[in-house]
Amino acid sequence: MSRTTETQVALGVHAAIAAYTQALDDGRTADIVATFCPDGATEIMGVGTFEGHEALHGVYAGMVPTAPQKHLVANTVITSWTESEATAVSDLVFLQRGDAGWAVGIIGRYEDTLRNHDGAWRFQHRNLTYVI
């Protein structure tokens, strides 16, 4: 019987974060929602908490970009892990391009709980807080 290693967990967590981020920047709402467990939730500072795929779809459909944007997620640290669950903390810098060029819009932090759901790492809970 093979055991899941810390490296395998880290790769799965990083893949989930990257898939979420790229889908968010591209405005692919269904792909964002697919990065969550069916009963997964997101908590966005100043916006609210949204649980389950239907609620997640509703909030992310309202965030489809109207201008080029990039969420740069870095400094991800896996804070705990088992074969089925992991927690991670990541820093966020949000850039948006306007008439004057690219500008920093948000600096924040994600605190995530992910589960290995049907063989893929998905968000059970994603909490976003802002620094600026």
Image (cartoon, rainbow, N blue to C red):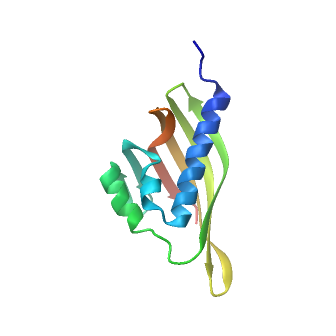
Residue in the image at 68% along x and 82% along y = 101
Q: Residue furthest top?
A: 1
Viewport quadrant of the C terminus: bottom right
Above or below, comparing residue 73 to residue 84 in the picture: below
Residue 47 seen from this side: no
Tell me where residue 37 appears, x and y as whole percent.
Answer: 40, 41
Comparing 2 with 13, the one in front is 2
Tell me where residue 106 appears, x and y as whole percent.
Answer: 58, 67
Tell me where residue 79 appears, x and y as whole percent.
Answer: 60, 35
Residue in the image at 57% along x and 48% along y = 17
Q: Residue furthest left?
A: 54
Whether residue 16 sits left or right of residue 52 in the image: it is: right
Q: Residue furthest bottom?
A: 99
Viewport quadrant of the N terminus: top right
Residue 9 seen from this side: yes
**What is the quadrant of residue 44 in the picture?**
bottom left
Tell me where residue 65 appears, x and y as whole percent.
Answer: 50, 72
Whether residue 47 sits left or right of residue 87 in the image: it is: left
Comparing 82 with 66, the one in front is 66
Whether residue 98 sits left or right of residue 126 in the image: it is: right
Comparing 25 with 80, the one in front is 25
Residue in the image at 32% along x and 55% along y = 55
**What is the quadrant of residue 80 in the picture?**
top right
* Callout count: 0
